[in-house]
Image (spheres, rainbow, N blue to C red):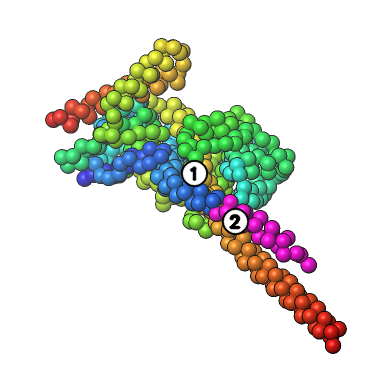
């Protein structure tokens, strides 16, 4: 049985851990609120870019940009959006699992990846995926420029590398308790339902011309989607981390309570034993005197 | 008859509402659009988008971006932008000096040229805004 001193030391250690997890919880909570505001503020832009290219896919006829033409063959490219750090529950695992199974189904085990975040990079190395580009240490105030090299890697895999599809995977932030692994095809631009989008006859008027506009618009669309995915990840990550740390803190509290109980029992048992010994000794003395 | 307009920057929506008329700096020059305009797609040069509704005019400065016109909806999506009323004249002039220096240091750089164009457009927008506020 553990001695009282061992148990007390154990309690102290857990109390230290609890302090750390509680501090991490506070930090994550503050960062989560900011990340959440950024996701909400950036969502309309990402949606608008998505609608814009979907409109072009529907009514644009003058110039068929490669992003608008379905392909039969070629490897798959996965843009994998994960966090650098862990301690966020099953957030990254869920995203990786959803993305990996989608890619396996459609492209087999040797697909290509553009990886954002250390967790995704470790996964890609473990799975021996073909890493086209990777990026860790993305800032919380991420903007479009910061993601440009990653976007270019994905776009050129399609335009020059002959990829069949570019797929984006990230955890979508729904609320504090729910982050949804999301896997969606970016390129070729998915067609819209007939009922959606513009109901107009004829093509756009393009300025300066169809080809020039679309060659600028399409990469900007991928970039907008990637930026949004990173923001969703950040809000998801800090939420998941906050919840994980809250669970850890409360688990630490439980363990401390149990250990304190054991410590008290051990202490009580020690006192009782000593009393018994004293009484026993006293009675032995009395008996000897008689 | 009005057209719905939304002006969105990558980090925040800038303006949303109805318009009777709007103008912007398209790839081939300044354009004006009325409701029920034919579909149009262009990129934007750095400059202002003006949205008129009734007697009111609102101005948004954009560093570039894309503009789509549909008969009932105009979408403007730009990497960065701000309401013209939010431009600080001093900050814009400071930015312009920096951009001019960089452009003279790196005469070949397309990035420097772009930054210079943005800075010039922002200063112009700030001056126009000041004049509008005086009137």
- Label for residue A18? 2
Residue A58: in sight, yes or no?
no
* Horizontal arrangement in the rendering, residue B52 relative to residue A173 (left or right): left
The residues colored magenta run A1-22
Residue at point 72%, 61% (across, down) = A5
Q: Is residue A6 above or below residue B46?
A: below
Of callouts 1 and 2, the N-terminal one? 2
Query: In the image, is B83 to the left or to the right of A23?
Result: left
**Residue A68 placed where, x, y %?**
51, 37
- Residue A206 screen position, x and y as percent: 38, 30
Q: Residue at coordinates 30% horizontally, 44% vertically from top-left?
A: B16
**Compared with residue A6, is residue A60 higher up or lower down, i.e. above or below?**
above
Residue found at the very far bottom of the displayed protein = A290
Which residue is labeled 1 in the image? A231
Q: Chain of mark 1?
A: A
Image quadrant for the C terminus of chain A?
bottom right
Mark drawn on residue A203: none
B44 or A8, which lies in front? A8
Q: Nearer the viewer, residue A101 or A238?
A: A238
Local crowd size for mark 1, using a 10 Å CA cut-off: few (<14), some (14–19), many (≥20): many
**Local SS, label 1:** helix
Any part of residue A230 in sight: yes
- Contact flag, marks 1 and 2 (Cβ < 8 Å): no
Q: Position of residue B15 (x, y in %)?
A: 30, 41
In the rendered image of this protein, does residue A230 appear above or below residue A262?
above
Magenta span contains residue A14: yes
Both labels 1 and 2 in a single chain = yes
Q: Position of residue A135 (x, y in %)?
A: 59, 35
Q: Is residue B97 left or right of residue A193?
A: left
**Residue drawn at the location 34% of the way across and 26% of the way down:** B46
């Amino acid at each position: 049985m553990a001695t009282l001193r061992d148990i007390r030391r154990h309690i102290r250690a857990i109390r230290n851990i609890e302090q750390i997890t509680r501090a991490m919880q506070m930090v994550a909570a503050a960062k989560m609120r900011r990340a959440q505001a950024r996701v909400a503020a950036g969502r309309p832009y990402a949606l608008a870019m998505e609608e814009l290219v979907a409109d072009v896919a529907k009514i644009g006829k003058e110039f068929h940009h490669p992003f608008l033409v379905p392909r039969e063959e070629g490897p798959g490219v996965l843009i994998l959006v994960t966090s650098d750090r862990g301690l966020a529950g099953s957030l990254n695992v869920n995203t990786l699992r959803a993305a990996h199974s989608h890619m396996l189904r459609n492209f087999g085990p040797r697909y290509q990846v553009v990886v954002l975040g250390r967790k995704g990079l470790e996964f890609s190395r473990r799975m021996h995926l073909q890493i086209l580009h990777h990026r860790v240490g993305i800032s919380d105030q991420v903007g479009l420029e910061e993601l440009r090299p990653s976007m270019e890697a994905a776009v050129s895999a399609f335009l020059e590398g002959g990829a069949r599809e570019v797929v984006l995977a990230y955890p979508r932030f729904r609320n504090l308790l729910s982050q949804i692994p999301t896997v969606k095809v970016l390129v070729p631009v998915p067609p819209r339902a007939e009922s959606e989008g513009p109901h107009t006859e004829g093509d756009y008027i393009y300025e300066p011309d169809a080809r020039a506009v679309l060659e600028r618009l399409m990469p900007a669309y991928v970039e907008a989607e990637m930026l949004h995915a990173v923001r969703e990840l950040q809000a998801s990550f800090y939420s998941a981390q906050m919840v994980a740390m809250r669970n850890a803190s409360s688990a630490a509290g439980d363990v401390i309570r149990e250990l304190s109980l054991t410590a008290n029992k051990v202490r009580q048992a020690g006192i009782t034993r000593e009393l018994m010994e004293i009484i026993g000794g006293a009675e032995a003395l009395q008996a000897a005197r008689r | 008859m009005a057209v719905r307009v939304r002006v969105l920057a990558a980090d925040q929506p800038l303006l949303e509402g109805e318009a009777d008329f709007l103008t912007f700096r398209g790839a081939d020059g300044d354009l004006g659009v009325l409701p029920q305009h034919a579909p149009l797609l262009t990129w934007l040069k750095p400059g202002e988008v003006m949205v008129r509704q009734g007697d009111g005019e609102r101005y948004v400065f954009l560093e570039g971006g894309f503009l789509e016109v549909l008969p009932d909806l105009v979408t403007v999506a730009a990497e960065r932008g701000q309401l013209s009323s939010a431009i600080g004249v001093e900050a814009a002039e400071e930015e312009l000096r920096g951009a001019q220096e960089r452009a003279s240091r790196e005469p070949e750089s397309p990035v420097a040229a772009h930054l210079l164009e943005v800075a010039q457009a922002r200063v112009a927008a700030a001056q126009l805004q000041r004049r509008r506020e005086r009137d």
